[in-house]
Image: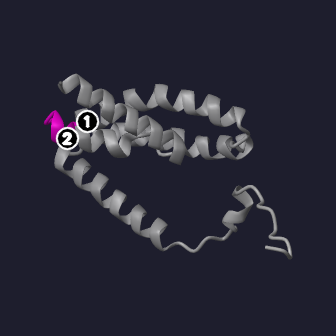
């Protein structure tokens, strides 16, 4: 039964991660902390191993749909790769409780920013146009 729960968590993380561009770690890490009683270091490391293949599939599908600005992604990736090196290095030294609390704080802060952010671009640009009602309607 436990394997089924873990596969379901992976399914939800993969679906939401690729839909929202989050990687799935936002679900995998807490699930591993709570269900498998893993240390924060092991949970975040395991989540990375899950995220890589998930994001490769999402990259392939979202790229085929034309939803990726590759030049912009390349520019951001430069900093992200350096940050990944730094974050991985820090994970070897920081206590697990610091990693867990940092993860929680980042989730809460990002949720607040996204919830209260005013949209700069109209969402109508992402929606197919609808037919105008005729005079007889």
Residue 136 marker: none
Instruction: Tell me the residue that label 2 is attached to.
Output: 33
Instruction: Tell me the residue that label 1 is attached to.
Output: 43
Q: In front here: 90 or 120? A: 120
For residue 93, say whether it is visible: no
Which portion, as a residue range, is magenta? 32-38
Q: Is residue 131 left or right of residue 99?
A: right
Q: Quick check: marks 1 and 2 in contact, CB under 8 Å?
A: yes
Q: Is residue 35 left or right of residue 127?
A: left
Where in the figure is residue 126, as x and y percent of width and height?
A: 70, 56
Q: In front here: 97 or 19? A: 19
**37 drawn magenta:** yes
Q: In front here: 44 or 33? A: 33
Q: Residues within 10 Å of mark 1 (few under 14, many from 20)?
A: many
**98 drawn magenta:** no
User: In the rendered view, would you say 118 is above or below 25?
Assistant: below
Where in the figure is residue 58, as x and y percent of width and height?
A: 56, 33
Q: Residues within 10 Å of mark 2 (few under 14, many from 20)?
A: some
């Amino acid at each position: 039964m436990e394997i089924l729960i873990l596969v379901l968590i992976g399914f939800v993380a993969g679906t939401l991660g690729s839909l929202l561009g989050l990687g799935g770690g936002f679900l995998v890490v807490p699930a591993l902390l709570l269900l498998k009683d893993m240390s924060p270091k092991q949970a975040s490391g395991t989540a990375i191993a899950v995220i890589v293949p998930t994001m490769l599939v999402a990259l392939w599908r979202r790229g085929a749909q034309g939803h990726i600005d590759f030049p912009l992604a390349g520019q951001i990736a430069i900093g992200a790769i350096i940050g990944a090196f730094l974050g991985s290095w820090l994970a070897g030294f920081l206590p697990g409780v610091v990693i867990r609390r940092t993860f929680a704080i980042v989730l809460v802060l990002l949720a607040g920013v996204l919830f209260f952010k005013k949209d700069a671009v109209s969402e109508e640009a992402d929606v197919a146009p609808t037919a105008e009602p005729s005079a007889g309607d």
